[in-house]
Image (cartoon, helix red, strand yellow):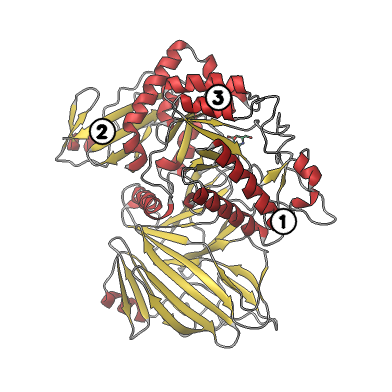
Amino acid sequence: MTVTFATDRRLWLINTPTFGYAARIDADLGVRHVHWGAPISLVTARALAEAAPGSAGGSFEQGPGVAELPVEGGDRFGPAGLIVRFADGARAVEWEYREHEIGEDELAIRLADRFYPLEIVLHYRARGGALERWTSVTNTGAEPITVLRCDSAAWTVPHRPDYRLSHLVGAWNSEFRLRRERLPVAETVLTSRRGITSHHANPWLAVDDGTAGEEHGEVWSAALACSGSWRVTVHRDPGGHTGWTGGTGHEGLVSRLEPGGSRETPIFAGVYTPDGFGAASRAWHDYLRAAVLPYPGESRPVLYNSWEATGFDVDESGQLALAAKAQELGAELFVLDDGWFGARTSDRAGLGDWHPDPRRFPRGLAPLADEVRRLGMRFGLWVEPEMVNPDSDLYREHPDWVLHEPHRRRTEMRHQLVLDLARPEVRDRTHAWLDQLVGELRLDYLKWDCNRPLTEAPDDAYEGQARAVHQIMDRLRADHPGLRIESCAGGGGRADLGILARTDQVWTSDNTDPVDRIAIQHGFAQLFPAQVMSAWVTDSPNVATGRVTPLRFRFHVAMAGVLGLGGDLTAWTPEELAEAARLVARYKIIRPVVQHGSAYRLTGEGALTGVHYVRGDDHVVLAWCPARPFGHSPGPLPLTAVEAGAEYRNLDTGATHSGEELLRRGLPLDLPAGDHASALVRLRRS
Ligand code: DGJ
């Protein structure tokens, strides 16, 4: 990547093969936004920097231009990304340029207040096709500064006649629902006040002018590396300015920056593409692989987990029976879920007492782990380290170790309270038992769960808890290099760029109904690649929805991510077990393409949708048609990621198709009749 720097006008241009970004020093704004979009020349950047940015004028209006991190003060009335109160109560900030530094792929611009002891550094780093931005703030004085907001970055998109916002909403069991709606002329707040990333919103968004499609049109997109509370304020003003500012914490949280103290925000990464939402997602997937995931080159194993089949009813003999069946089907990792420890026979007790329950595992967990390994599988365990049931030895011993406020009720959710990880003794003990457990059992895998949001938490905890979780994970991983971690928070409540820098996959949702999963996976994959999207095949009827679906359909939906098995295998018929074994084997064949390829979302007629993964000359298409209206037969599914002049051979039937046919008419699908039809097609470009 090339960073071009113009000293004459204090203008910085960051050009990469996929995007250009420019900002300049401005006497009023500190650093003013100039350009975010296609790569541009320095000459163009200079011209854009000199052009007076729009302002309606008049004494009621804000001054021209938009800052790279807006502050309060002067004629600025938009949402501020940095809000402070100095010791004497003053709130306005007036920046002066101090210096900048350019590294190989990084630019840092330092500003200081003209009078008060406040400095910031705006960081820009081009990595993996994205622009990473973050901010450091320092109190250079002798008195504390109150910080009401300290965002990672503010982003501005170019003027367009209209704008549309894409974002993710949801709830437990229905995470990652993609919303794409006209951006109102207003401030739109996307946020989590829960101290976890949340099921309800995700710190990812995309903006286009209302005309972009899957494979065409300009898209500007950003995602925060925040696993605690966060807030992104998208601002479209009547004058045409559109952008957003975002970072950790929700509204109303206040913190102190002590004299000499510094703080660095998490990364807010941005991606630009002229080629539609599909290209934006592929850019995000490439970025995660290049700059976020700990082991992007690894393939994630097929796992078995009995949670949905057995709930808390786990014991050594039952798990051994399931392990034997799972191995026969081709599982490569066996995970023992909730219920193995303390008095954990339901969600009412035991959390915090992390020793195997002798009634269920009289010989401890080692014999199960050994047998799982003897069967050729890796062994993993479920843990929920941040939590405690009041009905537990840990809580009886240390009732003060949870987040709580004097004179206030301790809010229980799922009968549990949250351990205060800001207390060193709590953090150390949490790390110590995890370290011991992973070490003694040589655990290959932790499913790290978190089943409630924070309540009664001090302001700092809404970010601090998540940071402590990151730190414990980092330490465990450093000390146990073979350990892999799945991020889970009652399903997909903790999926973000921050957690994915120290976990290997995400439990996408507790909802394993394949029809619901198509929508959940569609939203999840806007930002995250298939290699982190855990997807289990479970029993039918589905426990959450009661829907009855064929095994093949359940597999074909789950095969679009990291395939897992989550059904009660002891109740599957010999025919089902044989079909499942065939489909697991087939998944292993397509896995390199699914987990490491580029993803193209497909839409056919009616309810027919699919996803097409491409890796080199290898192509895999998974297509799903949940419902078929009378008289309708879902037609061929048009592909987008093929070359018109090339030829493609179906590796299973031997049939060949020209690229032109696949583009214009579509891929013929051999869909069984009726609802819940699906197909898996493997093609090779010849
Ligand atoms: C919530 C998770 O999402 C489930 O998969 C399961 O692990 C339960 N917690 C266990 O309590």
- What's the residue at 43%, 82% (across, down)? 99
Q: Residue at x 53, y 73 (%)?
A: 70
Contact, mark 1 vs mark 2 (Cβ under 8 Å):
no
Instruction: Identify the element where label 3 is drawn.
Output: loop
Q: Could you tell whether 342 is left or right of 281 in the image?
A: right
Q: Residue furthest left?
A: 645
Q: Which residue is mark 3?
A: 542
Q: Looking at the image, is mark 3 or mark 2 earlier in the sequence?
A: 3
Q: Earlier in the sequence, mark 1 or mark 3?
A: 1
Q: Is residue 448 visible from the viewing direction of this image?
A: no
Q: Residues within 10 Å of mark 1 (few under 14, many from 20)?
A: some
Residue designated by label 1: 457
Q: Is residue 556 above or below residue 25?
A: above
The mark closer to the camera, 1 or 2, is 1
| Quadrant placement of the C terminus | top left
In the rendered image of this protein, does residue 568 appear above or below residue 286? above
- Callout 3–callout 2 Cβ contact below 8 Å: no
Amino acid beneath label 1 = Ala
Q: Nearer the viewer, residue 28 or 362?
A: 362
Classify residue 310 by image quadrant. top right
Q: Nearer the viewer, residue 320 or 82?
A: 320
Q: Is mark 3 within 8 Å of ligand 1?
A: no
Residue 547 appearing in the image: yes
User: Which residue is at the front of the view, 29 or 288?
Assistant: 288
* Residue depth check, mark 3 versus mark 2: number of the one nearer the observer: 3
Which residue is situated farthest in the top direction here? 574
| Quarter the N terminus occupies | bottom left
Q: Amino acid at mark 2?
A: Gly
